[in-house]
Amino acid sequence: MKVNIGSIDRVIRIAVGLALILLGFSGVIGPWGLVGLLPLATGIFKFCPAYSLFNINTCKMKKS
């Protein structure tokens, strides 16, 4: 897996994922909160399969 998620994108994904999971567990949105696992996982692993499919890369790599 090649890293294709940048820092800002990663922070947003983790925050949204955690928020959805917490809303789900608190009963506000019910079991739909488990949808938050997807952005949380992509943020943690720094890889998004959809970005790979559409050749999108928000990660700024340093050139050596």
Image (cartoon, helix red, strand yellow):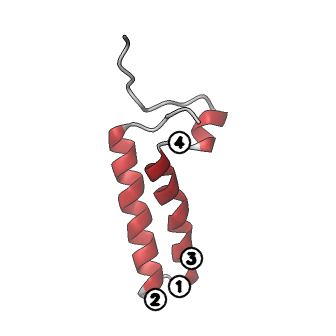
Question: Which numbered disc, 4 or 1, marks the residue closer to the eye?
Answer: 4
Q: Amino acid at mark 4?
A: Phe
Q: Amino acid at mark 1?
A: Gly
Q: For mark 1, what is the residue? A: 30
Which of 26/45 is in front? Answer: 45
Q: Which class describes the residues within 10 Å of circle 1: few (<14), some (14-19), or many (20+)?
A: some
Q: Which class describes the residues within 10 Å of circle 3: few (<14), some (14-19), or many (20+)?
A: some
Q: For mark 3, what is the residue? A: 32
Do the numbered discs 3 and 1 sit on residues whose CB atoms are within 8 Å?
yes
What kind of element bears circle 4? loop
User: In the figure, residue 64 lies in which quadrant?
Assistant: top left
Earlier-in-chain disc, 3 versus 4: 3
Q: For mark 2, what is the residue? A: 27
Question: Which numbered disc, 2 or 4, marks the residue closer to the eye?
Answer: 4
Q: For mark 4, what is the residue? A: 47
**Picture layout, residue 7 above or below residue 21:** above
Q: Position of residue 7 (x, y in %)?
A: 34, 40
Find the distance from the CA under tag 2 to the CA under tag 4. Answer: 29 Å
